[in-house]
Image (tube, helix red, strand yellow):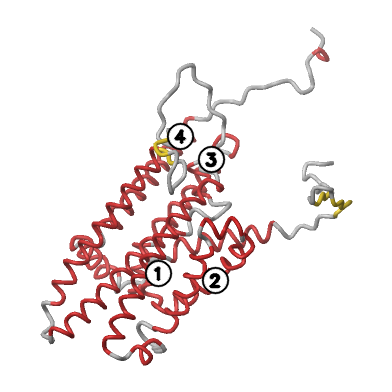
């Protein structure tokens, strides 16, 4: 056979992955799964006495090391998700982008899948799959469990103080507000993970960014609901004491600073109101520009709670900021506009020059 009879662009099947890479990928998946499950279990247990006891033992074991008290909190709350992100990067590098996002074969017979099987079609959550419905149930049970566990801890804490009945009610109100704020922080642990457009975690589980944003919306509603209850409890308690104006403008250098918390809550409420479905649909620009207040929200939240508490949510925020920075660097390329034309329907047609390919000779 003549050698020129072979097509220049002949189809060659990709060679199967080596056994070493397969074993390494399997090990990475197991390690990531174990870390994630252990992390989630700890977060679920944290409101109870068992979780608080584990945290106390962890701080006692690590606070005197190089990490310190704040570092120990960062390691147990934010460290696991950062470790998973690093391992996920290694996993995707070994697998290759085209192999991670390969198209699955079309089966002859339908197969039940939790991620695609719809459970709720018409409702406040839109179309909800079986996996999403299971997640909603887990989060709902967690919120009820957290409120119940924190209430028991509040009552046990009040028994240690000998105060008047009126002061006891105010103290219970303030401690309850503190617990609501902690539940809101636990929600914020996951809040920024779905909105990282180039998130390595979303690539790992093969969830499109457009689909993941709905999880951010759900978590945002829940987070702001608990933060609103957090602020309301303190406002009511301080109003009963007659010290509302005195305490609401307080800004301590050490400990909890109230005024930054007020600023953060106001910014969060503005984002929350403008993100409601009706406002977002009819006034999208208002929603978009108001949502840039997330910078104010996060910065003043950090000033409000301090580095020790802020380390609980620092991991997800760090991954989000890293994603924004990388996308900013990638968007610095200049693109030339060849032509612009306004169509009769009101649409603006732009013709852009194609950037040169890196593979061009």
Mark 2 and mark 3 lie on one chain; the one further toward the N terminus is 3
Residue at 52% over, 56% down? 277
Give coordinates of residue 108: x percent, y percent: 49, 16
Nearest to the eye among marks 4 and 1: give it: 4
Nearest to the eye among marks 2 and 1: give it: 2
Give coordinates of residue 216: x percent, y percent: 47, 55
Mark 4 and mark 2 lie on one chain; the one further toward the N terminus is 4
Q: Which mark is residue 295?
A: 2
Q: Are marks 2 and 1 in contact (CB under 8 Å)?
A: no
Q: Residue furthest top?
A: 1
C-alpha separation, residue under disc 2 versus residue under disc 1: 17 Å
C-alpha separation, residue under disc 4 versus residue under disc 2: 35 Å
The quadrant the N terminus occupies is top right
Q: What residue is shown with label 1?
A: 311
C-alpha separation, residue under disc 2 versus residue under disc 3: 35 Å
Q: Residue furthest right?
A: 339
Q: What residue is shown with label 3?
A: 94
């Amino acid at each position: 056979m003549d050698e020129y009879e072979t097509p220049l662009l002949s189809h060659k099947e990709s060679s199967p992955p080596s056994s070493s890479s397969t074993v390494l990928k399997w090990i990475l998946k197991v390690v990531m799964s174990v870390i994630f499950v252990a992390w989630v279990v700890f977060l679920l247990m944290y409101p109870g006495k068992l979780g608080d006891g584990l945290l106390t033992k962890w701080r006692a074991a690590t606070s005197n090391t190089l990490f310190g008290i704040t570092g120990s909190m960062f390691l147990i709350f934010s460290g696991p998700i950062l470790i998973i992100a690093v391992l996920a990067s290694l996993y995707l590098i070994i697998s290759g982008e085209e192999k991670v996002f390969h198209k699955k074969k079309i089966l002859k017979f339908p197969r039940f899948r939790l991620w695609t099987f719809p459970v709720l079609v018409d409702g406040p959550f839109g179309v909800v799959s079986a996996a999403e419905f299971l997640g909603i149930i887990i989060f709902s049970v967690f919120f009820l469990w957290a409120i119940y566990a924190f209430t028991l801890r509040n009552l046990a804490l009040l028994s240690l103080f000998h105060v008047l009945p009126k002061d006891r009610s105010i103290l219970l109100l303030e401690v309850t507000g503190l617990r609501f704020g902690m539940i809101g922080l636990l929600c914020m642990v996951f809040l920024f993970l779905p909105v990282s457009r180039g998130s390595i975690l979303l690539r790992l589980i093969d969830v499109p960014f457009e689909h993941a944003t709905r999880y951010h919306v759900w978590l945002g509603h829940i987070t702001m609901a608990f933060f609103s209850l957090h602020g309301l409890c303190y406002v009511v308690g301080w109003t009963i004491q007659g010290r509302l104006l005195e305490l609401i403008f307080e800004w301590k250098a050490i400990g909890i600073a109230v005024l930054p918390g007020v600023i953060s809550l106001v910014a969060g409420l503005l984002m929350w109101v403008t993100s409601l479905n009706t406002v977002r649909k009819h006034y999208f620009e208002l929603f978009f520009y108001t949502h840039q207040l997330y910078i104010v929200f996060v910065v003043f939240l950090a000033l409000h709670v301090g580095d020790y508490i802020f380390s609980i949510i620092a991991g997800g925020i760090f991954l989000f900021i890293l994603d924004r920075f990388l996308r900013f660097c990638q968007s610095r390329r200049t693109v030339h506009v060849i032509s612009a034309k306004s169509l009769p329907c009101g649409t603006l047609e732009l013709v852009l020059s194609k950037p040169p390919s890196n593979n061009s000779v």
